[in-house]
Image: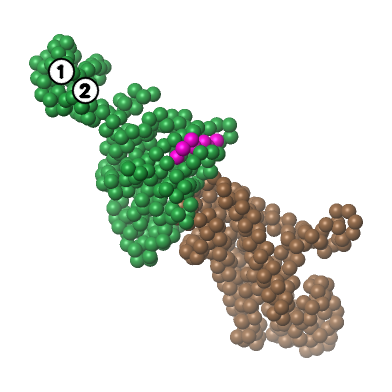
Chain colours: A brown, B green
Amino acid sequence: MWRVACYEWFDALRSRRALVVLLLYMAAAVCNMYWSINLLHKLENELATVLQLPKSEQTGVISTTLWKSKPFQRIMKEMTQNDLVLQDITGKHPVELIYAWFAFFYTPLLVVLVSGSRIAEDLGSGAVRYVIFRTSRVSWTLGKFVGQAFMIFFALILSGIGAYAVAKCRLAGSGTPDLFMNIIQWSVRAWIFSFPYLGLAMGLSHLTKSASKATIMGIVAITVCFVVTILLRHFTADAGWRAYLPYLGVLVPEEHKMYLWRNSLAPLVTGTVYLMTLGCCYLLAGYACFRKRDV
Amino acid sequence: MDNAIETTDLVKRYGARRALDGLTLAVPRYAVLGLIGPNGAGKTTWMMSVAGFLQPASGTINLLGHGPFDPDAHCGRITILPQDSELPLESRPLELLTHYGRLQGLPKQEAARSAAAMLAEVHLGDRLNSPIRSLSHGMRKRVMIAQCFIGYPEVVLLDEPLSGLDPREVAHMRAFLTRRRGRQTLVISSHNLHDIEVMCDHVAFIENGRTVLVSTLEEVIGTASTLVYQLTSEPADFDAAAQAVPEATLTFDAAAATLVCRYDPRLTTPEEINSRLLPALLSQCGVTTVTRGASLETEYLKSL
């Protein structure tokens, strides 16, 4: 399995499509950071005007004040919908939060675009036939999965480095090693969050021999996940079909995302184990269809 | 001699159509068996079933005495050249074949050495690190053939191995495959009966998903019991020629101007027959060639 995984990663790095998506993702992370810092600067200046504080040429100087303001805390509480998470992220550097939001929000799309078609491509071209008499089908599937997980990790670390570089240039006093380490930490958390989506996209990829169909199926799947998340947040469980909605939440990665926004180890470990298990379940569900299928 | 592959009553359906309809075939160990049959006869389906790519509806497969294909039991012992299957386009031949060798369980150095040697054998020594995307169709086919022989597997299944190769490479590959006789078990599917005749020592005729005939090439074309005379014209006195070899049966094909002489090898020898028949024929017409055995094409067409 490890040999398949290493070769898959190596091969994926050479894939033009994966490389383009990876670079686009990195560019998006950099641009997002750039625009967010500009926006933050404007917000701070407006806040300074309202609070009658001296305006600053540098962004991020009154972030601490901002965090202390009650209305801002209320906004954040609405956004996180979780007191514990709010407590954990309070006081964090805005750059960290901007990057974390970006990484968590766009990782599912990155996963589908980079990894969603890898298995279907090999099934369609027949390349799988050169491998599965040399190793078991399960090793091939798991190797592909692990190889793509490496690829996503690489993409997230690169985007984190890009975002940090922008923050260092644009934000005074933010080029600290601590901030760099924190951004990398958020990259790792986003990577853990990518597991269920990776499992879902690659599981679905077992069902077709067409790379484009596999990508479309992956996009539809993440859309369904988002729709279910919205439904779960806006409908309370009561009688009828809505009573079953909370059970759906078990299957939706978004519902377990907030574990990864916590600081303490226990929720982090719980979330990691849960999301990784969910990813493996999705992958193995796809593998179950492939296990005895003609190739 | 024990068998490397045994399939019994193999059935594979594609919807209502039966691609394999109870196909029974045994391939002796170290044999080079040619699979012959029309398009859609079931040759490729049989190979894919043996390699574990397809799941047969019924029947049994026994591969190297360990039942149907199982990666644990057969990894590195059986390889296949599948039809219509592309290699990963971004990969390089040397690294890809080394990777395949590693998957078969070869140590890194040995896998790399075996990959380089096989690529040199198929005349791709100068394209070891070119992306497969940049190779021509024939070159890709040679990489596909090379991957079959990494790590010296016991059984190699080759589906149309020579199609798409230029004449020089066809001759080279034919010689290469012929050299494997008695060392590895090869199953070669091809529509080119001349290639089969040159490379194989066993043949199987397949028709509508069933085996029509399985035998040694020698028996099928009658190497030991048939002499074929290519004549310049029809013998003026056919009876006189027949009287020269009363223990044999002569048949003249006017269209091809060939005289086929069949005899019982237990009673006489080809030299003895030829020593009496050739002078009798030369007194009546010209003889351009004398060969032992009929052509595979003749025997195959006769079997239909």
Residue B241 part of the magenta-drawn span: no
- Across and down, in percent, residue B7 comes to 45, 40
Residue A292 lies, in percent from the top left, at 57, 48
Kindly identify the residue that appears in the image at 73 percent across and 61 percent down.
A252
| B115 or B91: nearer the viewer | B115
Where are the magenta residues, as a range? B7-13
Q: Are marks 2 and 1 in contact (CB under 8 Å)?
A: yes
Q: Nearer the viewer, residue A121 or B290?
A: B290
Residue at the bottom extreme, as displayed = A54
Q: Is residue B128 above or below residue A189?
A: above
Label 1 Cα neighbours within 10 Å, binned few <14 / some 14-19 / many ≥20:
some
Q: SS of the residue at dot 1? A: loop
Q: Main secondary structure of the magenta part?
A: strand
Q: Hey, what amino acid is under mark 2?
A: Tyr
- Between A204 and B279, the one lying in front of the other is B279
Horizontal side of residue A227 vs B290, given as left or right? right
Image position of B211 (left or right of B219): right
Snapshot quadrant of residue B216: top left
Q: Residue furthest right?
A: A239
Return the residue nearer the eye: B74 or B209.
B74
Give the residue at mark 1.
Answer: B245
In the image, taking residue A143 as reference, residue B181 lies left or right, namely: left
Instruction: Determine which quarter of the picture holds residue A84.
Output: bottom right
Chain under disc 2:
B
The answer to whether residue B15 is above or below residue A86 is above
Q: What type is the residue that disc 1 sits on?
A: Val
Q: Which mark is residue B263?
A: 2
